[in-house]
Amino acid sequence: MTTSRQPLSLIYNQKSGFHSAYREQICECILTLFQDYGFEIQLFDLAQVHDFDALMQKVIQRHLQSEQRGIIVVAGGDGTINSVVTRLLQHDIPLGILPLGTFNYVARALHIPLDLLEAAEVIVTGHDQSINIATLNDRIYLNNASLGLYPLFIQRREQFNRYLGRFSWHAYSSALEVLLRRREELQLSLEINGQKYPLRTPLIFFGNNQLQLEEMKLQVAECVAIGRIAGVAVSKGDKWSLFKIVWQMVQGTLERAPEIYSFCGDQVIVTSKQQTLTVALDGEIAEMTPPLKFGIYRQALKIRVP
């Protein structure tokens, strides 16, 4: 156990999916653990923040001005982690994770326990591991980026979560609900390592989380493991084909679907005649102007792992 006090900034999101009846007791135990290991703790509640960039500048300066860098801890889901990582990339400050999301793919891929007390133990006793960050123009994604129907799935899922509570099965029910109402296709040009391909698709998905792709039973997960861009596109947009794809996704047999094809590259560029494209990045919706340039920022971030 260390005796010198180093800074620990805990950024938390009350809207994340942590609804334990013992929430206050667990939080108290975590803070006591951090104090016992010699950390000087400051708490930052995102619900009270009106300028996130200003908050992150304040937090980062606190750590840069300390003789010891300490650690910035995020208590939230993958979307909250993405927001913090975006501001942290240029600074040599490790990140700790207390997973409070619905799926917690970032934590699970790094073998960080989903039990909060165990995750806190990792923060004070673990080691720092550098990970690759996927980039899309001036944005990043830790898990995935997608175009077409998938952003609509995300928007509908968040509506379900808002009114019915956060449950993992909303990912499938929202997809089915969108498919019943919407049928849209994008006309794109896909450039992979300099080779161009015309693409007409209702959905294109870029993954940067090996675990998430493995759970979808996609062999392209191996692409992420070696630090390359992994992509999956749907070739047919009729409702029957899309319903079959959702069913195969539920059954874990998506790789066998003839309407699915995957690709792997070091650089991927998506162009379109549309002035803007709706993109979902780690569950957050953004309107972006093509061309969309995908890349990998290797060994870009230190995360505290077991």
Image (cartoon, rainbow, N blue to C red):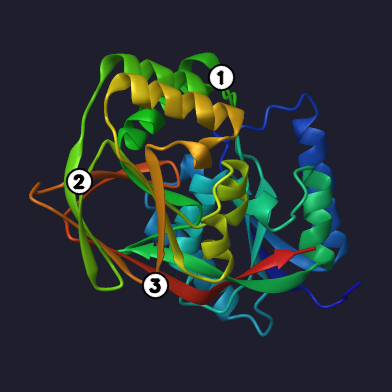
Residue 38 percent across, percent down from the top left: 83, 68
Identity, as a three-letter code, of the amino acid under mark 2: Leu
Nearest to the eye among marks 2 and 1: give it: 2
* Residue 11 visible within the image: no
Instruction: Give the percent coordinates (x, y) of residue 229.
Output: 43, 64
On-image quarter of the N terminus: bottom right
Residue 221 sits in quarter: bottom right
Q: Residue at x 80, y 60 (%)?
A: 122
| Image disc number at residue 266 | 3
Is the residue marked by circle 2 packed among few (<14), some (14-19), or many (20+) residues within 10 Å? some
Where does label 2 land, which residue? 277
The label number, if any, that marks residue 165 in the structure image? 1
User: Which badge, 1 or 3, is on the more N-terminal residue?
Assistant: 1
Q: Which residue is drawn at 48% across and 54% down?
A: 82
Front-most of residues 131 and 256: 256
Horizontal placement of 76 versus 29: left or right? left
CA separation in Å, label 2 and label 1: 29 Å
Answer above or below: position of 98 versus 95. above
The numbered mark, 2 or 1, whose residue comes first in the sequence reads 1
Whether 94 is drawn above or below 285: the answer is: below
Sequence-first tag of 2 and 3: 3
Quarter holding the C terminus? bottom right
